[in-house]
Amino acid sequence: MGVSLRSHLEKLLKSGQLARIKKRVSAEFELGALLNKTKGTLPTFFDDVKGYQMPVVGGLCGDRDLIGGFLGADKKELIPAILAAMSNPLPARLVPAGPCQEHVITNNIDLLKLLPIPKFHEKDAGHFITGGIILVRDPVLGRYFTSIRRMQFQSGNKLSVLIESPGLLEMYYQKEKQNQPLEFVILIGVHPVLTLTSQLNTQLYGLDKLGVAGALLGESVEMVKAKTVDLEVPAQTEIVLEGRMLPHKRMTEGPFGELAGYYGPASEQPYAEITAVTHRSNPIFQAIFPSSYEHKLPNAIMREVTLYLHVRHLVPSVKEVHVTMAGSGRFHAVISIAKRYEGEGKSAIMAALAANKDYKHVVVVNDDVDIWDPYDVEWAIATRVQADEDVVIIPPARGCSLEPSNNIRGVSAKMGIDATYPLAYADQFERVRIPGYDAISLEDYLEA
């Protein structure tokens, strides 16, 4: 029958990992506030949303252990598992029918009446779809391109879409030059593997993201033909919005509380007309709280894959990479290397900063440092860094528009910290050890 959000929620429920909130909540502020109480790390199911018959789920991709659980890998095995799926994708397959089209609505569409679209922050411009995956067909590769974009409800069947993703933006502009609309579908309520793979960098690798998802799931993603656009959609999706981004049409989108914890400014963005809403019987709406771990982590994991590959070209001794949550899942990276030659730390810094324009600060450490422990990383900076020799500053370069200090000038300075010790003095940086320490449990020595 294919993997689905429902099958995933059943597993979470059986394992006691799904929190259920049966008390009635409002889609305006209250639902988002509850998701944010755990920073989006707790899978949470809202049974009763005021004014709607439709439940809402969130918090599905905000914890590395949870993600590792549905991929069958721990956090240190995520990158190898994803790389293996990228190397051996399992193509999606077309089926004649699917539950995502058990109900079809093409007339008198009012999205806010149909769907419990949340309003998250005090100064948000309105209600935003944040957990929807936009799917379009790449005109060059012929493959499906997927990404998560914020989408503001405007009125009736109209949405404005922030399309700053380079791939999506280029596709829209190409269609606009031809005076044609860009057809798309929005997937709401999918298995979290599809959410995760939507964050892969298609432009860099030319990947079939649905094929990577299939490889990670162990079975092909089933697809059905959309009703009003020339696209296919994953058959198990809870809710599908079909539509067209119109050429030469713009609407004001934003402000909106974004991933860095600040309000992103209003701007003129393409507007989309929804031509059909299809959904399963008793559909489940999916929401992601912006700036939560669930917002940042899937993107951070896929950035780690790219980062690892980039650094490995210059520094084959790279061991691990970590894009931190405190750095909004895209601004800060920590890299560990098994340093063999002087200069490798700075080579790793250069490779990392070239891997993605969004990186601002990169720290490189020896492989005796736990890059997942902020204390250990700061300890390495405190005890192994001399600023006049080990800090690299690059004058303003292109940065990320979601980071407000970048927007003051439109560019961002970059900094790398080489927190590896000089090999000639390695004996002075030997960490203290206690023999048998890991085998000793304090609880065994305490009285009950």
Image: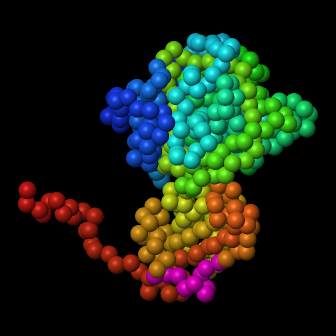
Q: Main secondary structure of the magenta part?
A: helix
Above or below — where is 393 with respect to 252? below
Q: Is residue 168 visible?
A: no
Q: Residue at x 85, y 36 (%)?
A: 248
Q: Which residue lies most toward the left here?
A: 447
Q: Would residue 418 be counted in the magenta stretch?
A: no
Residue shown at the point (40%, 36%) measured from the top left: 44
Q: What residue is shown at x 62% (from left), y 42% (from top)? A: 125
Relative image position of residue 10 (x, y in whole percent): 40, 26
Say above or below: 224 vs 342. above
Q: Residue at x 28, y 74 (%)?
A: 434
Q: What span is in magenta?
A: 383-392
Q: Quadrant of the C terminus?
A: bottom left
The answer to whether residue 138 is seen in the rendering is yes
Q: Nearer the viewer, residue 156 or 3?
A: 156
Name the side, left or right, on which 40 lies relative to 238.
Answer: left
- 313 w.r.t. 135: above or below: below
**How does the figure colour the protein chain or chains?**
rainbow
Q: How many marks?
A: 0
Question: How far across and how far down the image is residue 290, in percent?
Answer: 54, 46
Residue 56, image x, y percentages: 47, 29
Q: Foreground residue, 76 or 158?
A: 158
